[in-house]
Image: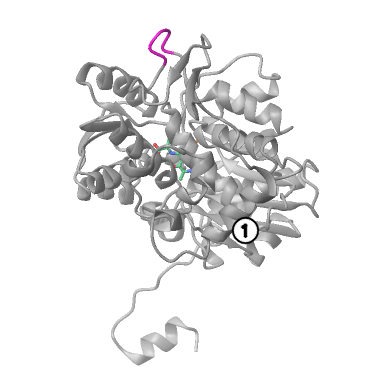
Amino acid sequence: MRVTWQVCAGCASEIPETDPHPRCPHCRGLLEVHHQAPVPGGNALRATFDARTALARGVLTSGVWRFSEVVLPNASAHVLSYPEGNTPLLAGTAVAAWAGARDLLLKHEGLNPTGSFKDRGMTVGVTQARRVGARAVACASTGNTAASLAAYAALAGLAALVIVPKGQVAAGKLAQALAYGARTLLVRGNFDDCLELVDQASERLGVYLLNSVNPFRLEGQKTIVLELLQQLAWEPPDWIVVPAGNLGNTAAFGKALEEARAWELIDRTPRLAAVQAEGAAPFAHSFREGFARPHRVAPHTVATAINIGNPVSYARAVRAIRDTNGVVTTVSDAEILEAKAVVDGAGLGCEPASAAAVAGTRRLIGEGVIDAGARVVAVLTGHLLKDPEAVTRYHQELEPRPPRANRPVEIEARLEAVERALGA
Ligand code: F0G
């Protein structure tokens, strides 16, 4: 009996698990991974997952492969793991107070090996690349996918190609791609141009495409949700709030929740809230029109990770929002930067796109969409050091000085100068 297979969302063709095409070979539609329901499910499956948290060695210590029965059950010998995941669920009292939430938890995905949630999808994507015998892997990226792909390709001994928009990738991310040895192309265009380019180039060059077009990436990203549910002893929160760009995570979260419910890991479904930057909000426009059609915009936001105008996982994400009775909202760049200063100032730290989740939580509570007493988990998707320039600009350069700016003071090397600077 087959355990895992792929289904085309366009023409409903069923395709074997190890078919190497990242899109439907018949109609180029997006593929989805299907698994046979794990037996047993429910309590017994939860117990299996829980028992593995005590392991000290081996691939099942990964926060992704701990859930292998619902991620990629047949991958065994090919699994390539750093390991990744096992990220903390943090209380962040100061952040909750700023957001007006009584029960806000922060799932810090910035604490993955390359500093973003992308590692969860990439361990599965590169594992699948090995299963299909790929020699090289490629992606377009706003930076984090590139960093993660470069690292995992290096771990696997595969050649890596990353295509990124010139001048729109945060310094830490570009540094990682170069350091891990990926062939890096800086495109004079935006992320949407890069994605179209890599989609064509990967086919022409016979390189395995590892953008979130690739459904195996999403199987890995599902474990953000599975792990946070496990950390809450399988007692679901009321809301999960996530920043949204290319919509891979929104789609993966919806799939994780649908399966978790079907396989009786949880008995009620949290609501999803996807948060976009005002200047890059095609999905939010569609939501306001009842998802009548996808939109395409010329994107512009300080949160370069989500500076995306034509999200590829649109249809998958619509399903995720509908199935979870979810919402899509927007926040301004100023709100993103303030939320980031609050998260950073609390000692937690995140990159600008991640702060959109916190700014979005505040906005949705303010509007009464999320109840102030609801249990909310917001996902911090990337590490503070990914984008050091955003920090410098906010604290040292912006005029007028933002409310939370922490300006450094330059002084002579004398004690009186220290005293004067401290107002002593
Ligand atoms: N947060 C961060 C830090 C990201 O890097 C991304 C996406 C998102 C949120 C949005 O997630 O695309 O699944 O809706 N970064 C991609 C990249 C596009 O290339 O690194 P999404």
Specify the amino acid type for callout 1.
Gln
Residue 27, magenta (yes or no): yes
Tell whether position 136 is magenta.
Answer: no
**Observer-nearest of 211 and 395:** 211
Disc 1: which residue: 231
Could you tell me which residue is drawn at 33 percent across and 23 percent down? 20
Residue at image coords 55%, 62%: 404
**Residue 416 location, x and y as percent?**
38, 91
Residue 181 in view (yes/no): yes
Q: Is residue 333 left or right of residue 210?
A: right
Range of the magenta residues?
24-28
- Residue beneath the point at 21% across and 39% down: 158
Residue 107, image x, y percentages: 57, 55
Q: Which of 191 and 233 is in front in this view?
A: 233
Counting from the top left corner in percent of width and height, residue 419 is at: 43, 88
What coloring was used for the rendering?
Answer: one colour
Q: Is residue 43 above or below residue 4?
A: below
